[in-house]
Image (cartoon, grey):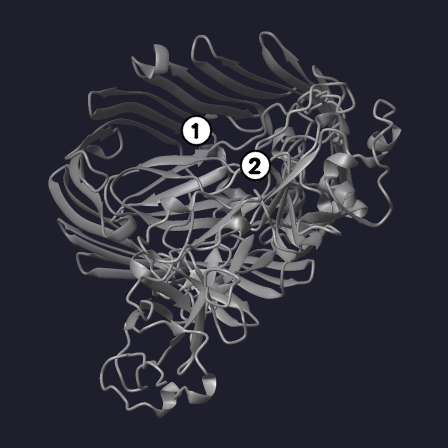
């Protein structure tokens, strides 16, 4: 945080500086012999007409809120000054107590309670204010010494918006069909993440529907819960089916209540996670990701390396099981380690998590009730302490630990004791030592993260193992559950040379063994990547070994038992995959296609080679496409895939064929928001959403999005807003009718998590007219003169070449062009618009004389009395 800035003493003696008056030189304005416009109103720099303006308020360049901005007349002058409210100033972050107690400036005016108007520098030493009329923004500059000590990015909780009542449905749909020899299989998947927002309460449901011809349709609910944030405590309250945090204890699915700290309520500068899944597909493959037996992701990927980095977070623990089904029916499975790394907190920052309820895992017949609590606090810049405990049905565990930062890296270490008892079984007691390490060696380009778990005694049972053991004993298969003895996870990234000049090495792996099973589980991936000119290449080796599962007793291989019995892989699994990939752009534009080649060899499946061409097309690169040819063993394959990112959804499709098989898939992802104005469709948008309402601006584009536009009803979706911090939402009239004018194009909003915040944009879509005119003597109308309607409101201005640019003109209207205050410094234009049946352009151009405003009105024939002029908009000169 920046230190205090001492303002210059305004009371200190100094030589007065008298500014010379500044005025516009009318000779710079075109017009020749035309009358000159009165420019005296522009001689006062920064003049703002008295009134109330609704806009953004900034303090020291940081956005604070949107509110009414009031300017009032200065008595005895033509000037205006802004007005302030003391409560509002305090909410912006100005410490008025510090201002009042500052004895260095006794000549300053005391800040009155309530509202006051004038130069803010007369009340707060060194402060100033400026108003931008084009952006409707008031910027306050206040010395840091008078600012409340808040972190960068801080947003006053009173400015967090709960949004409007709405329903949100995020969906992923996928239909997959495969024909192999004389067998055809078809399956479908629909994943939903739905929420209903009522006030500041949010109801969530996450689930998936799986369908196939071979098996019955099955719907699986992952989580259903109510959520409400408590800003005063910086916490979230959750009631229902959800997952506990896996920071220090195992993460389990719980039906009950949770209260936990939400770090998103902290400013970004004080914030200290779902893992990234990487893999390789040899064909158009079907990828399913499970956690604790629940499907959390289902998609189709193109051949080649793929990265999945948009998983919904379900807790900090619980390995991910990845299943890749190739187009020819081959299935590969591997596990993605997912465990917490050392977590240091800043001094004074803490985290609290409380959970109580019944464990609600799949197919459990004896689910325990648990009460769990953890607490973590930053004690200093070097030390963080944490503790926790679990009390449950036949289970007790307690933990104490610390995380500390050193020159050689960040460490965490904790000790956990657990006691587990089962009906008819002896009690198991034991302890566990866990050590974590993380180090980023900036000078050497090394980033190393290691988490090692070793259970010191065979009697130690973690929470997740205790749940499965309890259920297994109830079924009579207690020995079928492996109790982990030790485990190590490692992640290493090494840059070679400055800026990865010589490439990058990486290593990811995990190893685990068990007390009651022989062998061990090993997952290891190592690789090297680099660039040569425009060519990128990567070589990697993946080693998988699971020799523990072969010792499972045969009776557990039954239909309907929980996934922890591992019935799908009863035998040892050992495999090694060697992979080489190279990519080369076929041009230098962003739409140039890319050629990729891949060679792989697996011990279990043999060698395969493939080449693919991928690229993007269309406006804003909305279309992506790919074509692949390959060979695996004695069979050849070929396939096509494509995706279109539309305004309302993203759709994709693929087709491939090979020796003895054909495959096809179609999919769609998107979001549907139901609100009082109807239903609005968009591509995937997340759960914290902006709902733009700009009536009449259909086609206008939403900034910083993948092609979101305002629909015909005036609505558009702003996806993935960041909760509890400022989001700048811009609306670009590009794509809308030429008549559309946005009164405000950028809005700032700080939404609460899960909310749908409405952003209203003022739109003027009245007809835009360009009127070519001249004075009765043939001279042009003065450039810069105001154009007023019959009510006296300014509706336009005179541009170059004596052209009037006006909006919102009614048929048979009389406009006044004024360039001064004298009776001879104005003229009038009578407008006649085209008939209703005439074809109108977005912008109409008319021709009309500007007659003297001193003409006797009683002798003036109105335009309505003139003969009509067919097929062309015209203006009739009044008859004298």
Q: Nearer the viewer, mark 2 or mark 1?
A: 2
Which residue shows up at 27% across the image and 48% down it?
A: 621
Residue 217: image quadrant is bottom left
Viewer-nearest residue: 27 or 534: 27
The residue that label 1 is drawn on is 547
**Residue 677 makes an appearance in the image:** yes
Tell me how far mark 2 sits from mark 1, CA to CA.
Answer: 89 Å
Q: Quadrant of the C terminus?
A: bottom left
Label 1, secondary structure: give it.
Answer: loop
Graded by Cα atoms within 10 Å as few (under 14), some (14 to 19) or many (20 or more), the crowding at tag 1 reads some
Measured as percent of width and height from the top left, residue 675 is found at 56, 69
Measured as percent of width and height from the top left, residue 87 is found at 80, 47
Check the image and report above or below for 610 versus 641. above
Instruction: Classify residue 106 as left or right of residue 316.
Output: right
Residue 670: image quadrant is bottom left
Question: Which mark is drawn over residue 21?
Answer: 2
Question: Which mark is drawn over residue 284?
Answer: none
**Residue 394 makes an appearance in the image:** no
Viewer-nearest residue: 39 or 666: 39
Check the image and report above or below for 728 versus 573. below
Which residue shows up at 48% across the image and 42% down it?
A: 566
Measured as percent of width and height from the top left, residue 401 is found at 73, 21
Check the image and report above or below for 836 versus 379. below
Viewer-nearest residue: 596 or 580: 596
Label 2, secondary structure: give it.
Answer: loop
């Amino acid at each position: 945080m920046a230190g205090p800035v001492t303002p210059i003493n305004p009371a200190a003696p100094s030589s007065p500086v008298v500014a010379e008056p500044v005025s516009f030189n009318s000779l710079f304005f075109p017009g020749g012999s035309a009358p000159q416009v009165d420019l005296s109103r522009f001689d006062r720099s920064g003049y703002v007409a008295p009134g109330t303006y609704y806009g953004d308020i900034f303090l020291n360049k940081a956005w604070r809120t949107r509110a009414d901005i009031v300017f009032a007349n200065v008595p005895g002058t033509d000037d205006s000054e802004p007005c302030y409210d003391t409560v509002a100033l305090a909410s912006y972050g100005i410490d008025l107590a510090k201002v009042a107690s500052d004895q260095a400036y006794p000549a300053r005016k005391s800040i009155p309670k309530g509202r006051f108007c004038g130069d803010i520098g007369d009340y707060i030493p060194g402060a100033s204010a400026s108003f931008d009329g084009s952006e409707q923004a008031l910027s306050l500059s206040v010395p840091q010494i008078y600012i409340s000590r808040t972190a960068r990015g801080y947003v006053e909780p009173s400015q967090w918006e709960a949004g409007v009542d709405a329903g949100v449905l995020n969906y992923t749909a996928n239909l997959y069909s495969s024909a192999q020899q004389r067998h055809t299989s078809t399956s479908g998947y629909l994943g939903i993440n739905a929420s209903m927002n009522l006030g500041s309460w949010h109801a969530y449901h996450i689930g998936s529907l799986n369908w196939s011809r071979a098996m019955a349709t099955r719907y699986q609910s992952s989580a259903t819960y109510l959520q409400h944030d408590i800003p005063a405590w910086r916490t979230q309250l959750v009631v229902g089916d959800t997952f506990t945090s896996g920071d220090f204890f195992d993460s389990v699915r719980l039906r009950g209540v949770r209260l936990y700290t939400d770090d998103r309520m902290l400013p970004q500068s004080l914030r200290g996670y779902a893992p990234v899944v990487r893999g390789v597909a040899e064909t158009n493959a079907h990828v399913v990701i499970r956690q604790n037996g629940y499907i959390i992701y289902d998609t189709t990927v193109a051949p080649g390396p793929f990265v999945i980095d948009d998983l919904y977070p379900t807790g900090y623990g619980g390995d991910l099981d990845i299943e890749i089904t190739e187009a020819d029916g081959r299935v590969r499975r591997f596990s993605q380690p997912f465990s917490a790394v050392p977590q240091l907190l800043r001094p004074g920052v803490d985290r609290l998590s409380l959970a109580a309820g019944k464990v609600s895992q799949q197919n459990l017949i004896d689910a325990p009730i648990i009460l769990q609590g953890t607490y973590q606090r930053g004690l200093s810049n070097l030390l963080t302490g944490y503790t926790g405990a679990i009390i449950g049905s036949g289970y007790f565990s307690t933990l104490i630990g610390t995380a500390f930062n050193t020159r050689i890296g960040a460490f965490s270490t904790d000790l956990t004791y657990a006691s587990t008892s089962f009906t008819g079984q002896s009690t198991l007691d034991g302890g566990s030592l866990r050590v974590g390490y993380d180090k980023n060696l900036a000078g050497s380009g090394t980033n190393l993260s290691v988490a090692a778990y070793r259970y010191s005694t065979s009697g130690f049972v973690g929470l997740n193992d205790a749940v499965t053991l309890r259920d297994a004993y109830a079924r009579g298969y207690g020995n079928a559950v492996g109790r982990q003895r030790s485990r190590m996870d490692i992640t290493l990234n090494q840059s070679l040379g400055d800026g990865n000049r010589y490439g990058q090495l990486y290593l990811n792996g995990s190893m685990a063994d068990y007390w009651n099973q022989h062998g061990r589980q090993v997952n290891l991936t190592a690789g090297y990547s680099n660039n040569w000119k425009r060519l990128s290449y990567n070589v990697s080796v993946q080693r998988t070994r699971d020799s523990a599962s072969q010792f499972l007793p045969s009776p557990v291989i039954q239909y309907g038992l929980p996934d922890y019995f591992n019935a799908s892989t009863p035998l040892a699994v050992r495999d090694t995959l060697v992979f080489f990939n190279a990519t080369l752009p076929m041009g230098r534009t962003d739409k140039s296609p890319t050629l990729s080649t891949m060679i792989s060899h697996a011990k279990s499946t043999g060698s395969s080679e493939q080449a693919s061409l991928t690229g993007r097309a269309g406006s804003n690169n909305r279309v992506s496409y790919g074509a692949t040819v390959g060979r695996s063993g004695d069979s050849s394959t070929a396939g096509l895939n494509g995706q279109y990112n539309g305004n309302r959804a993203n759709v994709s499709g693929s087709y491939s064929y090979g020796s003895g098989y054909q495959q096809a898939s179609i999919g769609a992802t998107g979001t549907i928001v139901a609100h009082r104005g109807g239903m609005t469709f968009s591509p995937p948008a997340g759960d914290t959403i902006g709902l733009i309402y700009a009536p009449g601006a259909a086609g206008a584009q939403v900034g910083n999005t993948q092609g979101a536009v305002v629909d015909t009803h005036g609505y558009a979706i702003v996806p993935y807003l960041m909760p509890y911090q400022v989001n700048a939402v811009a609306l670009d009239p590009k794509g809308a009718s030429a008549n559309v004018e946005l009164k405000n194009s950028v809005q700032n909003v700080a939404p609460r998590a899960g909310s749908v915040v409405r952003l209203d944009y003022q739109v003027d879509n009245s007809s835009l007219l360009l009127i070519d005119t001249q004075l009765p003597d043939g001279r042009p109308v003065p450039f810069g003169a105001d154009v007023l309607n019959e009510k006296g409101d300014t509706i336009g201005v005179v541009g170059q070449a004596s052209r009037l640019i006006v909006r919102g003109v009614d048929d048979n209207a009389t406009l006044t062009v004024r360039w001064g205050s004298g009776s001879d410094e104005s003229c009038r234009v009578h407008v006649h618009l085209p008939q209703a049946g005439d074809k109108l352009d977005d912008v109409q151009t008319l021709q009309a004389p500007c007659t003297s405003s001193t003409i006797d009105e009683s002798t003036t024939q109105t335009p309505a009395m003139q003969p009509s002029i067919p097929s062309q908009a015209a203006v009739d000169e009044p008859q004298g």
